[in-house]
Image (cartoon, helix red, strand yellow):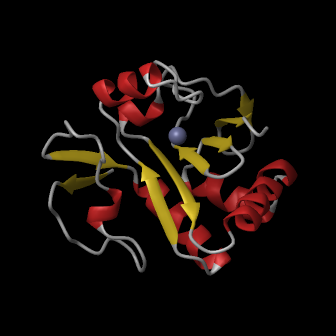
Amino acid sequence: MITLFKGGTRQLSKNFNERELFSKSKDAPDKHEFPQALLEALQYLRDLSGSPIYINSTYRTQANQDALRKGGNPYAVKHSPHTKMIAVDFQFLKDNKENVQKFHAFVEGRTYEFKEMRLMGVGGFGLYDNFIHLDTRDGVNHEPARLHDGIGRFQIWDKRT
Ligand SMILES: [Zn+2]
């Protein structure tokens, strides 16, 4: 885990800094955690795609999560891995649709790229039309992880329309 600080400006990898990975929740605490595995996966997909990545969400406070649900966001569930500091949602700033579709092909094909992300420690793969969700569930905490490979347990879900 990496500890991120509010107002921090550290460069955490070649293309990602502390500020963009810090929680966007209005009531975010002064610091929170973010998994190293997800930073590695983000940088990997940044390098593969050649596209800058926009981070939609990392840690969300439960109040933020509840507000999303009450606001009618069809994707917002009550118990989200975002509230446990183990998840990220993001999209590509260049050719988003094509790059998201390539990611879907990695996951569905269990390709080399998918295995690389599994080896980094990614355990949750959310397939959506316009963005990607990744998290570090491993089947030990209560996030469902019903699939398994040589590395451990993981979960894929498909919310494409
Ligand atoms: Zn998400």
Q: Nearer the viewer, residue 107 or 95?
A: 95
x and y percentages locating residue 125 in the rendered image: 65, 43
x and y percentages locating residue 64 in the rendered image: 33, 30
Residue 60 occupies which quadrant of the picture? top left
Q: Residue at x 64, y 28 (%)?
A: 145
Q: How many marks?
A: 0
x and y percentages locating residue 111 in the rendered image: 82, 59
In the image, residue 17 sits, relative to residue 7, either above or below, namely below
x and y percentages locating residue 26 in the rendered image: 22, 40
From the viewer's perspective, is 65 left or right of 48? left
Q: Residue at x 35, y 42 (%)?
A: 59
Q: Nearer the viewer, residue 114 or 17?
A: 17
Q: Quadrant of the C terminus?
A: top right
Q: Nearer the viewer, residue 150 or 13?
A: 13
* Residue at the right extreme, as displayed: 109
In the image, residue 34 sits, relative to residue 20, either above or below, namely above
In the image, residue 66 sits, relative to residue 85, either above or below, namely above
Q: Residue at x 52, y 27 (%)?
A: 76
Q: Residue at x 46, y 52 (%)?
A: 56
From the viewer's perspective, is 151 left or right of 75? right
In the image, residue 103 sits, relative to residue 52, either above or below, namely above
Q: Nearer the viewer, residue 5 or 136?
A: 5
From the viewer's perspective, is 130 left or right of 77? right
